[in-house]
Image (tube, grey):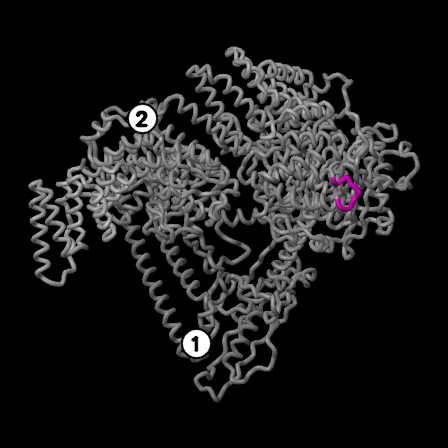
Amino acid sequence: MANVSAASRTRSTTPGSISEAEEITEAQLLKDNGDTSFDNEDYGAALHHYSEALKLDDSNVEMLSCRGATFIELGDFIRAQHDVEKILHLDSKYSQGHYLMGIVSDNLYQYKDALKSYLEALALDCEHENILADNIINLMPHFCPISQSTIEELEDMDAYTKLCEMGAILCVMKKYNLSVRVLNAARNLETNQQGLKMKVLLTLANAHTHLKHIEVALGFYQDCLQIAISSHDLDYQTKALASMASLYLESGNTHQAVVYYEHLLDLEEEMHSGKSQSELLDKTWPINFQLALHLNLSMAYRDIGNLKKAIKHAQLYISLVEKHDFKSEMAYSQDHLGQLYDILGEYQTSLQHFEKFLEKSKQENDKRKIASAYGKLGGCYAHLHNWKLSLTYHEQHFNMAHKIGDKPMVIAASEKLGDSYMMMENYEKAVECYEELFSAIKKSDANLKVNVCCKLGKAFKLQNRYQYGLYYFEEALDIADDLSWTEKKNLCEFHMSTILQNSTQMLELEEARKYLERLIPYYEDQKALKVEEDSCTSGDLYEQLNDCYSAVQNVHCKLGNMEQALIYSELQRQKTITEINNHSTKAPQSSFGSHGDRVTMETINRVINQQNCTVLYYTVLAKSLLLWVLQPGKGLIRHYTHQASKDITVGDNITDLTNQMVSSDGGRRRPGMGLDYTCENRALPEKGVSLQRLIKHNESKQATGGSTCATESEAYTSETSTTEYDFNLKAKSPDRQLYDLLLSPVDDILSKLDVGSNVVVVPHKELHHCPFSILKDWNNCHVWQKLSVTYMPCLYALEKVTQSELRYMRQDDDLLYERSRSCMAGMGHLIMSQDTGISKMSREYSSVTSTKADFEHINTRSLSNPRLFKSGAFTNPDLPGNRVHTKPVSRETTFLSIVTNQTKLSTIPSLPVTPNLKSLKPLGSPTGIDRMLSSGTVSTLTTRTATNTDIVTSPNIVAEFKQISSQGYCFVCGCPSLPEMLELHGKPWQPVGELTCAQREVTTIASYVDTSPVTGSDLTKQTFLASIQKATLIHMASWGCLQEGLIVMSPNENRKPGNMPNAESYIVSVEDIVNSQLKAKLLVLSLGWTNHTREYEDQTWLLPSAFLAAGVQCVLALLWPVSDRVLQKFYYHFYKSLQSDTRISQAINDANKILGTEDRDSWVPFVLIGKDVHLDLSVIHKAMLNQKIDKVEKEITEKLQTDFLNPTPANIEVPNKEQMKKNMQEICSTLLGQYNSQPSVIPTLMSLLDSALKRLHTNNLNRETRTVTKDMVESQGGLDLLKLMGFHFQARGCDVDDPYVIFPHSNEEELLLPAYDALRASHDLLQHANCCHCLYELLPTSEEILSQLIDLLSVTKHASEIQLKITDVSVHPLWINPKAKAFICSIGFHQIGRILNFKRTSVNRKLLTSCLQFLVALSSKKSSILLHKLDVSRLGYSPPSEKVLKDGNAPCLSTLYPLILPRNQLTMCTPWMSFVEQNEEMREKMKLSKSKSNLGQESRKQEQDAKIWHTTTSRAQAKSALEKVGQPRSPQRKVKVISGSSVSKCRTPVDQEPKLNNIDLDQRRDYANYLLEHRVNKIVKKEHDSTRKLFLPHVQSTM
């Protein structure tokens, strides 16, 4: 029993509410007497005194507690309980009352109430924590079997430790609620022992976990983890992370579980980094824990679809098992890895692991594992189409399961056997297995029953026994619906809809339509989610989605909804383009929406109305062929459906006829078109090609006879729309049969078109290989003789091509406009605009209101070509929807331009005098622009040059001569140079031979188009992507893969380090193409085919679609490979036809026509994908010549520093800080890329910049000289950075290899410190080759990307508790940027579903800090504060606001009227004292004057500093030279001389240094003065530039 006497002494004083002093005094006296009796253990007397006192004050809790304690000592617990209850009723926060209640309840055997009271008392009174803790501990044996020895062990501990240990004991004994209560009481106490705090938190989290309080448990685990991280306690970090991962895994949040498992791996890596911690790893992490970690990670990654990571950890799991010889785990480890490869579809590898699984199981003699191995081997062989072995293994699995008597295993064996029969297409046997399985299933196993019902229904569906199939699918649907299994429900509805589409009943078709229109968005969302999470997507999802699209089109056609069927067909077709990564971010505004998901008949008609062609839109279904005909202005004019016969599908029929065309023509062999090709192999090995070859090999070994399923009559009959042709089709040629199938239904429409009219064919599936142009009608006339046929992947691509064509036309119009502006030395548009400006100013200061209407707002740029007259050039700002776009101030946009060279110079009107407003009385008029430019003296020498400009002269001015050349050119590339071995699809690939024919092809084609081919090592991926963005015509001949959209180039020189180039360094993907902005009119694809026709099955046109989406107007591609000899002939005639303005289709027809004449019946199956555009190679040749001349002129101008044709600008633009930071990005990128060849450059640059910073603050340091090493002089980027920072160099004596360094005299734009920080960070980054390579690829980049990267790294560094996701607004733009993503991943980030996780090892943390420092140094917006702390106000990126010509708040300076003249000159147009300024203008001029004065003072100070700096530097160099000479020295007796000397000849010492002559000395002196003059001129130019910018808001402009 507790010591009540001690407790009675701890009473708080509660003032009574007695009104009379006597009663108070008497009550206090009675209480004192009671206390005396209590201390003397005279409890009866004490009880009497306390009772008498309570009669005077019955609400005094202190007296009540004293009497309650007395009752306890007397053993009267009932009366004590009444007093205590009254105390708590009066004051529930009175700790003594709770304590006494605990004692009373303990003695009354009410242990739960006692514990509650003690805990309440402990929460209110921490002064007696040891007494209360002892009472709590003594109560524990009443709740669980705790030995007395355990309680005795806790006696010497402090209260916090006692409660902590007792809570842990209770948790181990599964008294979780009790443990939580005890530990929460402990948390109310204070302690400095971090270990105990972590133990309490961890035990609390474990208890709440068992109580299923998930969120509460996670909170405690997180608190424990934070303390463990701060105290560097690896043990508790491990426990907290493992527990959190397990908890997330149990709760179904697998992605978050993987995050914490990855943190455990980071912790393991940290432990391995140090010797002492490595020993701790062995103690903290037993081998069983490491095995469980990798196994759990492997299974978790498998569940989220990241099979690569799952396989990686499964392999680590196997290695640990084998290393530590865990025989019990060897079989399971092989089984697990085999299952992963089986899911991934790598059946050959999975077969190897299943065989090892069988071997290990036999060694263990485990019958169940042996049987399981047989079943998995059977399934694997079934995927490889080795039916004999598959059935053998399945029979062994089934027999062993029966012998063992394991019913679940028997069920699994039956299911696997049925699955193999389904793959064999032996549906009757499959049905037998599934029915036997169905009868053996228990009613309680709903999941298995649904699966079996679905498999049974699918088997019956494939036998065309639709009624049976519907029965089982409805059965499964009911179960799935009852249990809310969404995925199972959707699967049942999918199969039911594909069955109901074959019906002829309207109700069933409507039901199918409802299912399909709900399923398509669901499957699309699932596919997008898989792509976003970078998880492995099963082929079933894509197959089901495609089947849904086909079924919904079929259903709508049967229901008569032809337009809706077309919409779904287009939705499916355009996914080829819209699903390319990063396509939506580059795509311009489209009628179909940013992702092509807004397809309606209105949008389709809008696209068609933009064309001048008829569109034939085909869809190939299993049992029908759909055709829509669309025309501009009419929309959909016809829909046709052709029903296939029962013995062959439409696709197979088209394929057979096309193959007949390839192999023969009416029995005659076509040269180059047979099966034996002399064709160069330019195809990359496809992914999984070895597996396909093995499957074909196994199929060829199977017996020709086999059981085939008997097909019952269909329960649902389809509408058959038989064609009207009853003649014998077998007697017709294949091209005639294809014409009857594809074009004859619309022959009446095509016959009405003019000869040569364009027809766009949108093919589908097998029709991608159908040569529509050479099909023959009943008059034996080819289609190309009447129509021009082009192809389009979809209508979305058609719109993209139209946009590209308009963009190309706009570029031509811009070129004509710029050329028109350069006429008359570029002065005509200035004069016209000045007239407008002066007239406007005159009206402002005239008292007479002008009745003449204001000038119309005409965009002369848009009107430079009549074709764009309707594009909105005439804009009225008063009309709704019209906008007046402002443009930055420049020489081109300050004034309106003239359109023709015949503009008549207008005279300047005199300003009217206003007698009423004397203050505004003009004293003169502004100087006319024609007078300022002396335009009246201009005379024309040449009216037209090669670029359609003129040449003028003037005796008063230097007339500007500007040739504006077209930038079009031909780019011919191919035959890249590849090493012996490369990485492809994650495996080594060895190119077979060299592309000799491709080399010959590109050389020949280059001669046809008058250009130099880019081949070999020059054709890198970087060069290719940069060149195609400027080319007008592109011809490429290389390796490629048309199915996957890959093109092979030479590996980049600065590629990612490694023994073997990875795919990213030399493969051009469709993502790379779409991210480019192309303007080519024609692209010729000469790649991707093999020697065998039947291996070429590109049914998506992925590469052509990507090029069309990137901006190419048309792509020329082969339908199938042809002979190299025939192909070379075709190219000769094709490019010959393009020498003059010719349509591409006409050039193809002409080439094939000549080929047919030269080589009988020979033709090349080229198709034109895109727009049938005109191309004139002579125009491109002329443009290329002009570009070459421009290049030579630029080189001469830069070499001689003199422009012989044009006067130099009076005020050169001075680069601002943003531009200099951009230049610094380029230089840093070069330094990172060239580090391996120049390792000493970055340390030398750091030393020079550090010295420059010190010299700016310590003048004495400038008296010391520094020289530049030879490595620095020869480096790439080193001298460029120094020049950017303001460094100069001067020769040192006769030696020019190591000149003196002339340090900058000022810190221009405050860039010295950021440059030093960037170099210092670069030096740290050089230890991480992968990160340096990614930075080299990323830079230079935009300020927005830099800001987003800095925000990401700063948040990760300073706020590790924030969980970033790839869908976050600030992260998503980086993640879809391939280069930014590669850089992020190189630091240590990786994707886990939508979570962006950072691998927090010490190495990665240091790397992140270095990258953050590097990026902050290169950014012109971000502050270095983000390096040290997270400032939320500095996060985000605000794009710079567009500059306007005139600030809306800046008043018009009529007394100055500033103008920007040619050569970027700022002048004031108004003569002195022409106008009198008003007060507002006067104030503005005073501000300008003050600002101008400050600029001048600052410039004078900088000039003075430059001169002082120059003097100090010169003296230091002179002193250095004098010190080298020194005092006269006595001559040496022996001197080593150059060999060959004699007494009669001059003897030259070996170490004699050459001496400067007078000319050299003068040159050195002049150069030193030149450097000073250069720096002073730079200061003056900066002052002029700042002055010009000061007046820019006041420059008047009417544009």
Q: Does residue 1298 appear in the picture of this structure?
A: no
Q: Earlier in the sequence, mark 1 or mark 2?
A: 2
Circle nearer the viewer, 1 or 2: 2
**Side of 620 relative to 1543 (left or right):** right
> Quarter of the image containing the N terminus?
top left
Res 820 quadrant in image? bottom right
Q: Give percent across and percent down for residue 922.
A: 47, 82
Q: In the rendered view, tell whether residue 66 sits above or below residue 379.
A: below
Residue segment shown in magenta: 500-507
Q: Which residue of the protein is positioned furthest toward the bottom in this rendering?
A: 916
**Side of 1186 relative to 236 (left or right):** right
Residue name at image x 38 percent, y 28 percent: 269
Q: In the rendered view, tell whether residue 433 sits above or below residue 866.
A: above
Residue at the disc numbered 1: 1472
**Side of 255 relative to 873 (left or right):** left
Magenta stretch encompasses residue 827: no
Q: Give percent across and percent down for residue 1051.
A: 55, 32
Amino acid type shown at disc 2: Gln
Q: In the rendered view, tell whether residue 1266 sits above or below residue 1062.
A: below
Amino acid type shown at disc 1: Trp
Residue at the disc numbered 2: 277
What secondary structure do most residues of the magenta stretch adopt? loop
Using the image as rendered, state which of residue 1398 and residue 158 is in the foreground.
158
Using the image as rendered, state which of residue 1232 and residue 174 is in the foreground.
174
Q: Badges 1 and 2: C-beta atoms under 8 Å apart?
A: no
